[in-house]
Amino acid sequence: MRIAFRVACCVLVLAIGLMIVSNRAAQTVAPTAQDVVASKIAPWLRNHLARGTKSEYLVVLNDQADLRGADALPTKAEKGRFVYDALYNKAQLSQAPIIQSLKEQGVEYQSFYIVNMILVKGDLTLAESLASRSDTARIEGNPTIHNKLPESEKFNFDTVRPESPAAIEPGITHTRAPEVWASGFTGQGIVVGAEDTGYLWNHTVLINHYRGWNGAVADHNFNWHDSVHSGGGSCGANAVAPCDDNGHGTHTAGTAVGSDGGTNQVGMAPGAKWIGCRNMNVGAGTPATYLECFEFFLAPYPVGGTTAQGDPSKSPDVTTNSWSCPASEGCSVSTLQAGVQAQRAAGIMLIAAAENSGPSCSTVTDPPGLYDEVYSVGALTTGTDTIASFS
């Protein structure tokens, strides 16, 4: 009798417990359409737009191209063509309805394909309208990032002298690069895509390595792009030839390939060629300017041209990047990573600075240096194995 009573009590307790859980589940309110819209807009952007002003933001679509087929292709040329076609065609088809709506509303926009997204300038009302669409995955900010460019790395045009130093630069020697050169490997046959503050392309250590220079005349088509469309400092906007409004980019290109053919050896790979893209306006970049340069390198196009004219056969083998885009300042880690992954799928290796926070920072925390798809590099104090103060 006692056993039956205990069993009955257990069943009763279990039933009550199930009723409580059931009631709680019933009380759970399904997300409203307004909740869904709100969840698609990045908090940083919502706070920014709450001031009632217009701002630039990125509308990322749900339908993204599948690039996995590139892995099975044997050559870089085949990978590049596959990736470009897949990305470009996907963007053209899926963006058409949104673009039509933006045109009807007179909204400023710029289409991207390396990540299937659209750069829009508008207010919170427009952002919420776009977020309500079923084809919109998320809406993110396009913050202006003032990069911490080390003073020691800036190229001082006022102190440029044509004479060469007596020996190879100490940093090059310290990495034992001359031993690699002596083995016959100087970077020959390799093209470096450099994106930074721009480039003094005809500097003595860069001109003969610029792919657009044949020794007599320059052709900047497919070799240079400017993603700075307003401002631009001393270069202005939309520069039709490589120009550096800060000096940092000229320095980084020199570190990659710089050599005057004589004793002035400042670059790691003096046998390589380079092409360039300006992604910062006097040191300040945005996710859009960064990704625009990613697109250009994936399939370069003529100066003043469009991505429809992109030629993936002219893409570089490696890109060099000394800039950052912290999530704490409104950058989207996942969207930039998608651009990096597209380059890798196309057979392009991306090199990035391990940030400029100093040796006390034990980890790389910001794009693009933090991604698994990126090879990150730092700097040492000249002649030592001590991490530099700016690295």
Image: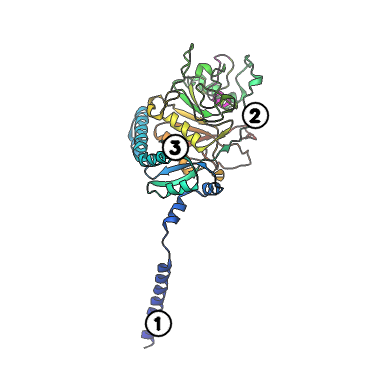
Q: Which residues are magenta?
A: 251-262
Type of amino acid at the residue the image marks with label 2: Ser
Quarter holding the C terminus is top right
Per the model, the C-alpha gap separating discs 3 and 1 is: 61 Å
Per the model, the C-alpha gap separating discs 3 and 2 is: 30 Å
The magenta stretch spans residue 260? yes
Front position among marks 2 and 1: 2
Q: Which residue is mark 2?
A: 152
Numbered circles on residues, count: 3
Front position among marks 3 and 1: 3
Give the image location of residue 299, x and y in percent.
40, 28
Between residues 279 and 55, which one lies in front from this camera angle?
55
Residue depicted at 41% across the width and 24% down the height: 314
Type of amino acid at the residue the image marks with label 3: Gly
Give the image location of residue 239, x and y in percent.
52, 24
Give the image location of residue 213, x and y in percent.
48, 16
Type of amino acid at the residue the image marks with label 1: Cys
Quarter holding the N terminus is bottom left
**Is label 3 in a helix, a strand or a loop?**
helix
Mark with earlier residue (3, 2): 2
Front position among marks 3 and 2: 3
Height in image: 49 above or below 278?
below
Q: Which residue is mark 3?
A: 339
Using residue 44 as the reference point, say whether residue 74 is left or right of it: left
Using residue 227 as the reference point, say whether residue 388 is left or right of it: right
Between residues 127 and 135, which one lies in front from this camera angle?
127
Q: Which residue is mark 1?
A: 9
Residue depicted at 42% across the width and 41% down the height: 105
The magenta stretch spans residue 81? no
Residue situated furthest bottom in the rendering: 1
